[in-house]
Image: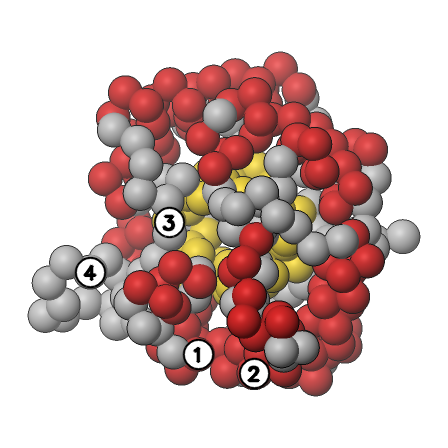
Amino acid sequence: MTTRKPLIAGNWKMNGLGKDGDELAKNLAERIKKAGAAPFEMLVCPPFTLIGRVGEALAGSTIALGAQDCHSKAKGAHTGDVSAPMLADLGCRYVIVGHSERRTDHKETDATVQAKAAAAQVAGLIPIVCVGETEAERDQDQTIAVVARQVAGSVPKDSTAANLVVAYEPVWAIGTGRTPTAAEVQDVHARIRRMLAEAIGAGEAAKTRILYGGSMKPGNAAELLALADVDGGLIGGASLVADDFWKIAEAVSKR
């Protein structure tokens, strides 16, 4: 029986203006207050422009605040970037690093992702390190090789279960409505845990949360969250709709 508390994380991506963020955050805060002691941890990661006001809207609730990226340096001449200490100063507890959209659009390497994750840990944040294969890599049966390379190269060497979350996101499933079978998801997650055991030790790996990201929605959340090595979800589009995001979180109780 696992003692890993599921993390239901919402990645709002580049969506939302002030009013949208306020309404969504307040809606979720009210729901979790009514729910009382929830069997899951909830996290929202709005765009940089909304972090401050979303944090205010979540005040008094147990919902954690996070960001979608950070720079590997604490400060300096990096126009347009935001550092991990700045995010911590805004009240963030988590930060997503190495999302496939960052790896693709901004050509981020495993080394870049590892540096960002390490910077987050130094600042007291918990990085959610994303790994996952493209459709072409999957079709060439390269899923495990790609994920193994990304885990080895992206996870800081001195990580622990307390300062690391890993998210498996098959790139071909993000926002497409397609998902791997439950058996395929469990297989990759179990392998990631074994990879983590090699990197940070079996004891820490057993306690580290591994999220699934890739078109998780109310209709398939219960099946995915029931898998032995799936410890929550990194939710994209569905996290922008309060009802859908909350239904995904409620599916934790069906594990």
Indicate the amino acid at tag 1: Asp
Residue 60: give its label.
none
Marks 3 and 4 in Cβ contact (< 8 Å): no
What is the C-alpha distance between the residues marked 1 and 4? 19 Å
Taking depth in this image into account, of 225 and 42 the one nearest to the observer is: 225
Label 3: few (<14), some or many (≥20) within 10 Å? Answer: many
Instruction: Give the residue displayed 62% in from the left and 15% down from the top.
Output: 34
Query: Callout 4, which amino acid?
Result: Asp
Q: On the image, numbered disc 2 is attached to which residue?
A: 149
x then y, percent, for residue 87:
31, 51
Q: Which residue is mark 3?
A: 67
Q: Residue at x 76, y 61 (%)?
A: 184
Q: Are marks 2 and 1 in contact (CB under 8 Å)?
A: yes
Q: What percent of the width, then of the height, locates residue 105?
A: 31, 64
Quadrant location of residue 165? bottom right
Q: Which residue is mark 4?
A: 81
The x and y percentages for residue 162 are 60, 61
Residue in front for this viewpoint, 141 or 64: 141
Q: Give the quadrant of the C terminus.
A: top right
100 or 47, which is in the foreground? 100
Is disc 4 placed on a helix, strand or loop?
loop
Tell me how far mark 3 sits from mark 1, CA to CA.
19 Å
The quarter holding residue 136 reads bottom right
Q: Nearer the viewer, mark 1 or mark 4?
A: 1
Residue at mark 1: 110
For residue 102, side relative to residue 207 (left or right): left
Locate residue 183 relative to residue 216 in the image: left or right: right
Asked whether residue 158 is in view, the answer is no
Q: Secondary structure at mark 2?
A: helix
Which amino acid lies under the numbered mark 3 shown in the image of this protein?
Ala
- Quadrant of the rendered structure where residue 6 is? top right
Q: Which of pointers 2 and 3 lies earlier in the amino acid sequence?
A: 3
